[in-house]
Image (spheres, rainbow, N blue to C red):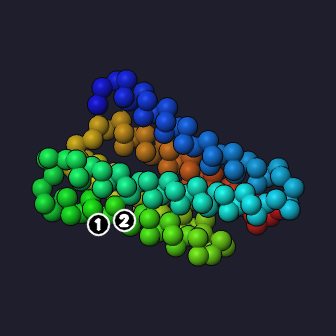
């Protein structure tokens, strides 16, 4: 990937953190009557992003000409797991944040291994680590706000 794409990927990746951060902040400052809406919005955005992370694997598997059949199968199978984890997080709001935090950690760990097989640039894996760290912090702060406000 050339440098302009790297810059665009970085900008879009960090822009994707805006809802996580704003929703987390809102949970600390809004009137308690509104808190439930922001909690559900945070979980819903987490569902969308976890599902997106899985979808990346489908895109790579379908577009790659260099993956062997075993790695293609792994990519396609793994590609649906984040969506399943995300869906499970919506079953119960009380544990939803924990499920999503675990989901994002597991997704990063799998991505780190699979992205090397996909021959993606190392800067992308480093970016994923930064983005995952912020997402986990935002989810954790939202969970804390939900339980002490």
Question: Which corner quadrant of the image does residue 36 belong to?
Answer: bottom right
Q: Which residue lies furthest to the bottom in this view?
A: 91
Q: Mark 2 points at which residue?
A: 80
Query: In the image, is 124 to the left or to the right of 145?
Result: left
Which residue is painted at 44% across and 65% down in the image?
A: 83
The percent position of residue 55, horizontal first and vertical second, equals 37, 55
How many other residues sit within 10 Å of disc 1, few (<14), some (14-19) or many (≥20)?
few
Tags 1 and 2 touching, CB below 8 Å: yes
Q: Quadrant of the N terminus?
A: top left
Q: In the rendered view, tell whether residue 37 sits above or below residue 21.
A: below
Q: Is residue 33 left or right of residue 116?
A: right
Mark 1 element type: helix
Question: Around disc 2, counting alpha carbons within 10 Å, would you say few (fewer than 14), some (14 to 19), or many (20 or more)?
Answer: some
Above or below for 115 versus 33: above
Which residue is farthest top? 4
Residue 80 shows up from this direction: yes
Q: Name the residue under label 1.
A: 77
């Amino acid at each position: 990937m050339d440098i302009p794409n790297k810059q665009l990927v970085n900008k879009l990746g960090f822009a994707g953190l805006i809802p996580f951060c704003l929703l987390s902040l809102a949970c600390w400052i809004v009137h308690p009557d509104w808190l439930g809406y922001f909690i559900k919005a945070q979980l819903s955005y987490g569902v969308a992003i976890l599902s997106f992370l899985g979808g990346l694997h489908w895109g790579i598997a379908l577009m790659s000409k260099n993956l062997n059949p075993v790695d293609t199968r792994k990519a396609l199978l793994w590609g649906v797991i984040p969506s399943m984890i995300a869906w499970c997080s919506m079953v119960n709001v009380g544990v939803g944040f924990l499920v999503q935090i675990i989901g994002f950690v597991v997704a990063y760990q799998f991505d780190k291994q699979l992205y090397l097989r996909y021959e993606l640039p190392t800067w992308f894996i480093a970016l994923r680590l930064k983005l995952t760290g912020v997402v986990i912090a935002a989810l954790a702060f939202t969970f804390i706000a939900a339980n002490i406000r």
